Image (tube, rainbow, N blue to C red):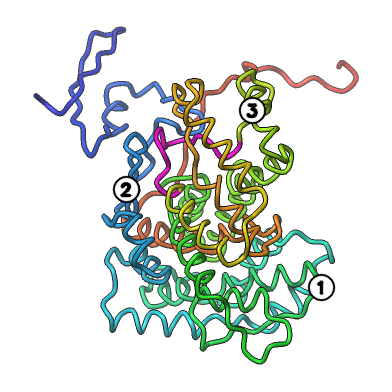
Amino acid sequence: MSESITITDNRTGESKEIQIRNGGVPAKEFSALLPDLWFYDPALLSTASCESRITYLDGEAGVLRYGGYPIEQLADDATFLETAYLLINGELPNEIEYAEWTREITYHTFIHENVRKRFLDGFHYDAHPMGMLVSAVAALSTFYLDAKDIFDPEILYKQIVRLIAKMPTLAAAAHRFSVGMPFVYPDNELGYCANFLSMMWKVAEPHFEPDPVLVRAMETLFIMHADHEQNCGTTAMRIVASAHGDPYSATAAAAAALYGPRHGGANEAVIHMLNEIGSIENVEPYIQQVKEGKRILQGFGHRVYKSYDPRARIIKETSEKVFAVTGKNPLLDVALKIEEIALSDEYFVSRRLYPNVDFYSGLIYQAMGFPLEMFTVLFAIPRTAGWLAHFKELLEQDLKITRPRQLYIGPEARTFIPFSQR
């Protein structure tokens, strides 16, 4: 059987056979036959905007792989920095490569003093940490002027290292500013995730030692969020990269997309929903209101997953280990009851609505002490590695600047009317 499709222009009777490649068909082949037509695809739901080696996602089967490696294996055995290296370079590092990668990331965790003293300290006292992060990342482009030389491999690599290294520092600084606590410098004796927890929670200890269970939980959560194909933030990253913007500006654009509640705010919405439900007794009435179209079941369903999100299963297991250290989040029983009912109810099963990555991640973050306004920031830290992998890949592919077309639905040509005649 031929791996192709045939299209026919019924206006002319002309037909054309188009080969299927990697599960898609080239739009330019359609344009050759139909040069006067554009594809109308709001939100790009049926459009592949690129070819990528970075992440494989099969929403029907609930499969997620980074560079061919199942997310389950990475979550069990890898560190976040190993995963970041894999995303950026396409292969897992050997011991020598990993040691050098870790050393460089650690060396670049410090931020310029002027970023902290003159920029971050200039925000209003109640500024949202995510707004501060977006602005601070964009501002970094003014501190590293060589960042605009994106076609020098060594210079680009240095910016990638800087961004992955500095995101936890900027994130922790934004949080501590928002709660009126002094800035904590990075501790180069700690690993990536442990250092982040130190910068978040250190008070007066000479040396902060985070619980290893919580450190591993952060590693797992960061791995889960490191990349997820062509989501809104990654698409924003690629669009700016296609204009050859510098990595800091492009990362700020991606983070700005993530800042939107439809994208990065989903786990926060889950916590609000669980708080609203309050107790197990209120779960069934709430579920009934969802079925009647009066409520939304946050944390269920996904744009691409039509079976159980593999990340949700991993994070649910991680939550049990975290709660053994922090104590059980009082909202966990409500969440478990929701999942139990939804997974056995034909209404949700027939619509293929299963828990996604956001359903349990917020419970873990809350149990670890993170305030709700930090949830999207926690998403941005690891996703930076995925964003930069796409930035680098787009440059390697030498793609044209992104420029979609539109279907015009406004008025036809008309004559300007002076004020006196309107």
Could you say where residue 150 lies in the image, as x and y percent from the top left? 43, 68
On-image quarter of the N terminus: top left
Q: Amino acid at mark 3?
A: Glu
Could you say where residue 256 lies in the image, as x and y percent from the top left? 62, 53
On-image quarter of the C terminus: top right
Range of magenta residues = 298-311
Closer to us: mark 2 or mark 3? 3
Q: Residue at x 50, y 39 (%)?
A: 355
Could you say where residue 407 lies in the image, as x and y percent from the top left? 52, 24
Q: Secondary structure at mark 3?
A: helix
For the residues labelled 2 and 1, the Cα–Cα distance comes to: 42 Å
Residue 381 to residue 355: above or below: below
Which disc, if any, is residue 284? 3
The quadrant where residue 153 appears:
bottom left
**Residue under label 2:** 56
Magenta stretch, overall SS: loop
